[in-house]
Image: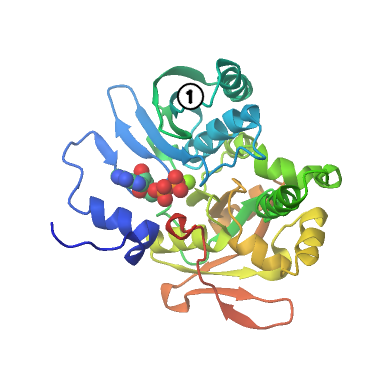
Amino acid sequence: MSQHTDVNKYGEFGLIDHLTKDFKPRLPSTLLGIGDDAAVISNDKGYTLISTDLLIEGIHFDMMYSPLKHLGYKSVVVNLSDIYAMNVRPTHITYSIAISSKYSVEALEELYAGIKTACDLYNVDLIGGDTTSHLKGMAISVTAIGVTSEKDNIVYRSGANAGDILCVTGDLGGAYLGLQLLEREKQIFLSNQNIQPKIEDHKYLIERQLKPEAASDAIAFFKKVDLIPTAMIDISDGLSSDLMHICRASGVGAFIEEVKVPMSEDAKIMALEFNMNPISCALNGGEDYELLFTVSPDEIEKIQFMPGATIIGEMVDRADKLTLHTTGGKIYPLEAQGWNHFEL
Ligand code: ADP
Ligand code: MG
């Protein structure tokens, strides 16, 4: 134990692999342990899905621009998103907080008002949690649970095949650009407190960052048209990084067509204002919480008319790796540049 290896050596995903490599599921009821958006446990009458997230003040949220009500809402929604990403409806959450004395009861009431709004909208019950003290800020841990009686409806990251169609819900890059905007206005405000933030013109981007929604409509649509995607993940780290998770788990490659990647006009304009390439924001910006999924080519007509969904590419053989086909006709290798929390 005298060694001191820097956690940056592994990166987030490498570190998880390293720490958990000796924890192979030992019970027959553990259908799936570590490695997907949620774990799957089988019980007498069905299957329980469980996913958990930890959010730390100063790393995942900034009190300068996260209203507590929004934070409560977002912290629930991003967790529910992991259950939806398995094609299952979430049913319950537990919510744990560590808080310093700088937070008043009124502040926490705001947080819980946001939690309540999310529970009402997504129809889930808050069933427990834990409350403890924190030396200087706030930490939040949310666990989301979903149940299903149909094992075959559960969609993993690992089911994609070469030839499958690659689709995404909603639009991408907005949450990242909303964050850039909030950060810029924060810096301006810190340097001169008389200047009020100019964010009213960019409501959509700010909302994408502070009040994201989980893609529950997509799950309802799949059920309605009797479609089970072959693989699925929610886009929390960025399109490139999350597509790489599907490719790794499924043992396939993929290409994305740049021209097809959906972005809002607001996001494109804001990217240019920040001197960024819009497509990089869509590929590498995180926290959009849209669903990235693959569909067998036999089912293409079911997806062509899916509201808000876009076909952005195709899965290919592993040997063909992950590439971006640019509008200018070039082919670039895609690299995952998702959030590395240790480098923040
Ligand atoms: P997501 O972005 O969908 O929340 P993560 O990348 O956080 O997923 O986690 C990937 C997998 O690793 C999940 O199965 C998660 O439960 C597991 N995992 C993450 N951190 C730990 C940890 N400290 N110990 C055990 N398992 C972990
Ligand atoms: Mg996820």
Q: Secondary structure at mark 1?
A: loop
Seen as rendered, the residue at the extreme right is 201
Type of amino acid under label 1: Ser
Q: Position of residue 38 (x, y in %)?
A: 40, 40
Asked whether 82 or 266 is in front, the reply is 266
Does the rendering let one see residue 36? no
Foreground residue among 195 and 153: 195
Residue 92 is left or right of residue 122, and the answer is: left
Residue 99 percent location from the top left of the image: 46, 27
Q: Is residue 50 above or below residue 281?
A: above
Q: Residue 236, image x and y in percent?
A: 54, 49
Question: Does 208 sit above or below residue 144?
Answer: below
For the residue carrying disc 1, how many other residues have a C-alpha within 10 Å: few (<14), some (14-19), or many (20+)? few
> Which residue has dot 1 on it?
101
> Furthest-left residue in view?
1
Q: Position of residue 312 (x, y in %)?
A: 65, 62
- The one of 332 and 260 positioned closer to us in this rendering: 332
Quadrant in the picture for the N terminus: bottom left
State whether residue 186 is above or below residue 54: below
Q: Within the image, what quadrant is residue 176 found in?
A: bottom right
- Residue shown at 51%/60% (left/top)? 338
Q: Residue at x 54, y 38 (%)?
A: 78
In the shown orientation, is residue 336 left or right of residue 324?
A: left
Which residue is at 62% across, 21% downward?
110
- Circle count: 1
Vertical placement of residue 81 versus 279, above or below: above
State the colouring used for the structure image: rainbow
